Amino acid sequence: MAHITLPENLPGIRGPMAFRPETAAPLNQLAEILLRGESTLTRGERELIGTYVSSLNDCFFCQNAHGCLAQHYLQCDMAFIDQVKRDYTVTPLSDKLKALLAIAASVQRGGKFVTAA
């Protein structure tokens, strides 16, 4: 697996952006499109997915940044966000969002874990 040394004082995506500054603008554009562009998902749902994947990645910065935005957009409390991170399957979410969280978890583990099922 490839590895690069990133500054420890720049959490989340900020480290890679500092490592290769020319990537910052395209990465920010991608994040804008994914999190705020046209979608069948609400901003809150997209931020909640980001929160969940960031928790699987054990990234304190990202899961809290996405979690705070999800909390704002979904008008929920942090206990709800924490419950999603612990076990989304028992959290009151739509079947669609639960399915998307399952897919996101599979993608986070690796592409070979994404199956037709």
Image: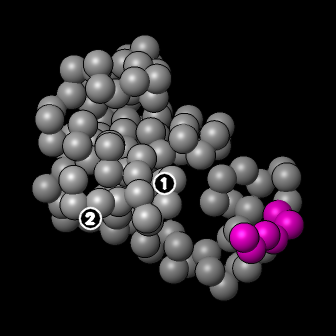
- Tell me the crowding category of disc 2: few under 14, some 14 to 19, or many 20 or more residues within 10 angstroms, Cα based: few
Q: Which residue is drawn at 26% across and 64% down?
A: 37
Q: Magenta span covers which residues?
A: 1-6
Quadrant in which residue 6 is drawn: bottom right
- The verdict on residue 2 being magenta is yes
Quick one: 73 or 39, which is closer to the camera? 39
The answer to whether residue 65 of the structure is visible from this angle is no
Where in the figure is residue 66, as x and y percent of width and height?
47, 42
Amino acid at the residue labelled 2 = Gly
The colour mode here is one colour
Along the horizontal axis of the image, is 71 left or right of 96? Answer: right
Can you identify the residue that label 2 sits on?
37
Q: Which mark is residue 108?
A: 1
Using the image, determine if residue 77 lies above or below residue 103: above
Q: Main secondary structure of the magenta part?
A: loop
Where is residue 100? Give x, y as percent.
Answer: 26, 47
Residue 59, percent from left and from top: 64, 43
Q: Which residue lies at the image location 74% right of the left edge and 74% below the top edge? A: 2
Q: Which amino acid does label 1 sit on?
A: Gln
Sort mark 1 into few (<14), some (14-19) or many (20+) by Cα contacts within 10 Å: some
Q: Is mark 2 on a helix, strand or loop?
A: loop
Q: Does the magenta stretch include residue 8?
A: no
Locate the N terminus by quadrant: bottom right
Q: Residue at x 47, y 45 (%)?
A: 53
Identify the residue at horizontal 61%, vertical 75% (top origin).
Answer: 24
Residue 22 lies, with reference to residue 4, above or below; the image says: below
